[in-house]
Amino acid sequence: MSGARFVDVPASPHGRAARIAVHATGAGPLAVLLHGYPLDHRMWEAVRRGELAQRRTLAALDLRGHGSSPFAGDDAHAMERFADDVAAVVATLAPDGRADVVGLSMGGYAALAFAERHPQRLRSLALVDTRAAADAPAARAARDAAIAVATAQGAAAIADAMLPKLLAPGADPTVAAALRAMIAGTPVATIVADLRGLRDRADRTALLPTLQAPTLVVVGEHDAITPPAEAAAMAAAIPGARLVVAPGAGHMTPMEQPTAFAAALAAFWDTAG
């Protein structure tokens, strides 16, 4: 499977109908890659070009409103809506109806919602630079402040504010430029809907001990947004979970250290089956 295609998903109580763009390469069982906020499938490009494509069909989604997926008009992008979109993709593309789900940051929140709502479609789970807890009051207030900035100043202002927090010190300038371009190119309506969904997402900490699928937790050594200590606690709460701390990475491990990330994911898939 190669190239891009669209999967149509119907409206639900969690959001309007949408068309989800899927950028797939490789061969083998389906692996779904879920990007962070406010990015798109291109954050996985270095990973998709590597040896993982020999092990899996790597399907990098553009979540609704991102990349090639049109904005559906939702006031908020609920994690449950993202999860149901992913389920529609898996049902359409996976021969056995299941997928390895890999989610970074916001994509990790969506992956946890997917694990809760569609466990029968989950082969394995990789939670990357993310957390299970809901936003604390201060973080919720910061989301509201970011909504105001995006509305008044545009996506470029969001990119300028976020970039220093996303990457480890001394990050590759090429990676920084690509990351900034992705954020600055995201429609403001999408950014606002994302922020509302992030602000209001459910706390899924209690879900962790109930997870039955093989699970990998990956975190950058210098991740300032979801720090290694928090990732370690999350991994400890999941039965049998494996923790990998990626040296030299911040919050964007698959972009900053794609070779190390791919090696960790390959080793995990080898043991997960």
Image (cartoon, grey):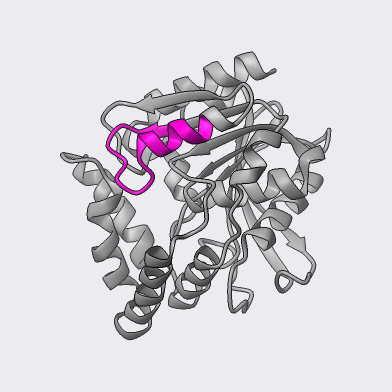
Which sits in the foreground, 134 or 73?
A: 134
Q: Residue at x 71, y 28 (%)?
A: 29
Q: Residue at x 51, y 61 (%)?
A: 67
Q: Does 222 appear in magenta? A: yes
Image quadrant assignment for residue 247: top left
- Please state the horizontal and vertical placement of residue 6, each as a whole percent of the image: 69, 57
- Pick out the residue farthest to the bottom: 152
- Pick out the residue farthest to the left: 170
Q: Is residue 219 above or below residue 28?
A: below
Left-right relation of 46 to 32: left
**Can you see residue 75?**
yes
**Can you see residue 47?**
no
Q: Residue at x 35, y 72 (%)?
A: 155
Quadrant (top left, top right, bottom left, bottom right) of the N terminus: top right
- Marker count (numbered): 0
Specify the segment rendered in magenta: 219-235
Left-right relation of 270 to 44: right
Quadrant (top left, top right, bottom left, bottom right) of the C terminus: top right
Left-right relation of 39 to 96: left
Which sits in the foreground, 102 or 175?
A: 102
Q: Is residue 32 above or below residue 55?
A: below
Q: Does 248 appear in magenta? A: no
Q: Is residue 145 above or below residue 269?
A: below
Q: Is residue 219 above or below residue 63?
A: above
- Please state the horizontal and vertical placement of residue 250, each as a whole percent of the image: 30, 40
- Please state the horizontal and vertical placement of residue 261, each as a whole percent of the image: 42, 28
- Please state the horizontal and vertical placement of residue 201, each as a whole percent of the image: 57, 62
Which sits in the foreground, 42 or 206?
A: 206
Q: Residue at x 34, y 49 (%)?
A: 225
Left-right relation of 203 to 86: left
